[in-house]
Image: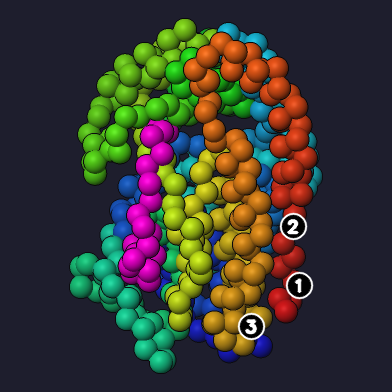
Amino acid sequence: MALFDRGRVVVIGGGIVGPATALALHKAGFAAEVYEARGPEESEVGAWLTVAPNGIAALRAIDVADAFATRAIPTDGITFRNGHGKVIGTIDQLRAGENMALAAKRSTLHDVLRTELAARGIAISYQKRLERIEETPEGVRAWFEDGDSAAADLLIACDGFRSRTRGLLFPNLPAPVFTGVLGCGGFAFPQPALPVTGRTEMIFGHKGFWGSLATPNGETWWFDSFPWPNEPKPGELAARSDVDWLRLLREVHAGDPAPVGPILASAAGPITAWPMYDSPALTTWSRGRVCLAGDAAHAMPPYAGQGASMALEDAVTLARCLRDMPAPEAAFAAFERLRRPRITAVLKEVARNGGDRAPSSQIALKLRDAFMPLFLRLGQRRMAEIVGARIDWDQRVA
């Protein structure tokens, strides 16, 4: 029996990994409470995501996989096309059993997790922006900008790649570096509706990279990424109207093949944009009674399709470690020992996949198109071990 069974845990961050961590801690016997800096609607930013089979297994470990599956869409895989519409590679995914991947709006996963928080009596407080952390021999206290505070035995930080908690723990750590790439996404109802194939269509466009998925209700979910000259200032992206974004996106994707044109022609908003960053590597994810998880510990760019799944695995693994180890320092050390090899493997795939998606010369374009099937096969083999892994909730952490 762990020393901190039935202890109180403050979880900072109400996105995906924070609620998932609170649910896992609750299942492990802890009293968890979630604190989110933004309001309930603001914290649902984002377009859509795919939860890989390993992420679905993590949801199953905290007993919410079925609730998510009823509101998500099974996917078969990905088809890649070049800027002329030619298929240059595929990634195939089974739609059944343990190999199933599910796509959903990010807000849907948020809602599923928050519904489960309420069902299990786990409180989530909004507009609680962390200001400072006070550690004592008996525990830890989180202070918020509105003057409120919360005392607990432990604090788990799930507050994203711009983690306020990480900055408080490691004040000399370099800030995340803007990559020069902007992500953007939204939803549309093309007329006529696009055929539902269960596959994500990804296109290496002339000036940007595109992805979209047609859903059974006639709606199409889309995202893209394209170069952006300077790091956006606070509020700069949010200040642009949906009309401005659509005007820019239609320029970026002018000349790109279907279904890009029909989707952008029917898109109206809301459109969400986000800058992409490289975050500094951490030598440790914890200090004292405070531990980082998800993007706060290891920011996961989207180029391997594992961001949500790795965060969900973090949540389950950290709760298991706290359940089974005799002290928080030992639990946090076990968490890092178990998670770092997987995170490192995925980040290597991110580095391989996140290079120049718009080669500048015709020779480079032809080489990319010719070798893409080989690159995808090799990548799929490397990812098979990651995607195929399953966390056993009942197995004791040694």
Estimate the x, y position of residue 342 in percent, counting from the top left.
66, 56
For residue 247, side relative to residue 1 (left or right): left
Amino acid on which disc 1 is placed? Gln
| Any part of residue 155 in sight | yes
**Residue 197: in magenta span:** no
Q: Nearer the viewer, residue 212 or 67?
A: 212
Amino acid on which disc 3 is placed? Met
Return the residue at label 3. Answer: 325
Q: CA distance from mark 3 to mark 2?
A: 21 Å
Q: Residues within 10 Å of mark 3 (few under 14, many from 20)?
A: many
From which residue to which does the magenta span run? Answer: 163-183
Return the residue at label 2. Answer: 390
Q: How is the image coloured?
A: rainbow
Return the residue at label 1. Answer: 395
Q: CA distance from mark 1 to mark 2?
A: 11 Å
Q: Nearer the viewer, residue 239 or 114?
A: 239
| Any part of residue 304 in sight | no
Q: Residues within 10 Å of mark 2 (few under 14, many from 20)?
A: some
Estimate the x, y position of residue 170 in percent, counting from the top left.
38, 69
The residue tagged with tag 2: helix, strand or loop?
Answer: loop
- The quadrant the C terminus occupies is bottom right
